[in-house]
Amino acid sequence: MTQTTQVTESFSQEADAILERSVGGDAPVAGVVAMATDREGNVYEGAAGVRRIGGDVPMTTDTVFALFSTTKAVTATAVLQLVEEGRLDLDAPARTYAPAIGELKVLDGFDDDGSPRLRDPKREITTKHLLTHTAGFGYDFFNEHYARLASEHGQPSIIAATEACLQTPLLFDPGERWEYGSNIDWAGQVVEGVTGERLGDVFAARIFLPLGMTETTFEPDDRLQERRATMHARGDDGSLTPMDGWDLPQPPQVHMGGHGLYGTVGDYMRFIRMWLDDGRGEDGAVLEPETVQTAVQNHLGDLEVRMLPGVIPSLSNDAEFFPGLPKSWSLPFMVNDEPAPTGRPAGAQGWAGLGNLFYWIDRENGYGGFWATQVLPFADATSLGGYLEFETALYASLRR
């Protein structure tokens, strides 16, 4: 019996039930797509519910999602390709490749009249700082100082996908702590500075083509738009309201390497398999095995990944994976430094996207998975809970 057959026989029925519970409970999600893979191919593909609550178009495995921060690892991959080619030095000042980042100051509090106090940073931002979320950037929905800059001083939302939205002050001097934010949007600017191409074109030629990812893009055409899942807002009573018309700006002024992609779960599974299989894709290598093995180590040192406080309740609840467990950051992913309660081993990789999309990559056992919904705020109890059940069920099937 093959590894794939073993998982499929013991796991599919339970996974189907988890998806159905997620769309059928007291605080349901409208629809969900989930997939699991080994190094060779998908061992499970499932969909439940509808693309829009109250509608009659079923959720299907080829549904297109706003991928949000699951975009980040793709940008990190493009950075690593340039490092392999000797075109990018992770420890060089990032302004070498993206000059505008060298103009940014550190926010040193607010004056009595509410004006932000700014000063020069003590050290240069490097591309490694950007990849590890230690450059000093934040998000307004996770940081009260950025939220204040937005509400009182008109700092544009990162969702605007403009050059102006990138021009935010640093919250601390580069390298001093981990703070989740717009670091990878700047890493995308570094890629554009090195290549002289738009980020989406770099992805298409250098990552998506060798992986066979034909349905992932910053600018979805009509073919993809007609399969889009609707974003939903969760009410205090657990109800869902469709956010009809919600969209990331199209076309975006800036291809946002931190959150801008649209795509299918099936496409993302090809990306996950590449990381499981030492950088290999179906139609050629994306990364060298040595690059993959180096990239997935802890690159935070003594710093730690922290809980994300939900500063804007409509966008995010307080969020943390595996509270109480130490977590670090590799170059593309979060790393759980101890075994997780789902069964995920220490050293596995993973992350998420704002619309309640979650994935993991377990190189030790050769498995990964992705769970996709479109609901706000982030860390939705139903969606995150269903995802954790899904991952747990896969590891339970491996033990049987």
Image (spheres, rainbow, N blue to C red):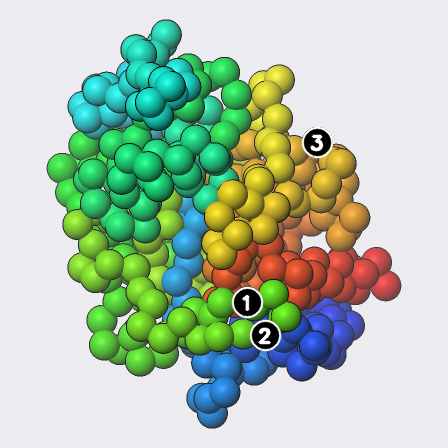
Q: In the image, which is nearer the foreground, mark 2 or mark 3?
A: 2
Vertical placement of residue 139 versus 259, above or below = above
The residue nearer to you, when weighing 257 against 343, is 257
The kind of residue tagged 3 is Pro
| Residue furthest right in the image | 400
Q: Which mark is residue 234?
A: 1
Residue 296 at x, y percent in the picture: 54, 34
Q: Earlier in the sequence, mark 2 or mark 1?
A: 1
Report the residue at 57% width, 63% height from top. 371
Vertical placement of residue 24 versus 36, above or below = below
Question: Which element is circle 2 on?
Answer: loop
Question: Which element is circle 3 on?
Answer: loop
Question: Does the CB distance between marks 1 and 3 fall below 8 Å?
Answer: no
Res 245 quadrant in image: bottom left
Residue 330 at x, y percent in the picture: 53, 32
Along the horizontal axis of the image, is 348 left or right of 394?
Answer: left
Q: In the image, which is nearer the foreground, mark 1 or mark 3?
A: 1
For marks 1 and 3, give the CA distance. 30 Å
Res 35 quadrant in image: bottom right
- Residue 130 in view of the camera: yes
The residue identified by callout 2 is: 239
The residue identified by callout 3 is: 326
The kind of residue tagged 1 is Arg
The kind of residue tagged 2 is Ser
Question: Does the CB distance between marks 2 and 1 fall below 8 Å?
Answer: yes
Residue 116 at x, y percent in the picture: 33, 22
Q: Earlier in the sequence, mark 2 or mark 3?
A: 2
Along the horizontal axis of the image, is 189 left or right of 125?
Answer: left
Q: Earlier in the sequence, mark 1 or mark 3?
A: 1
Report the residue at 76% width, 40% height from top. 339
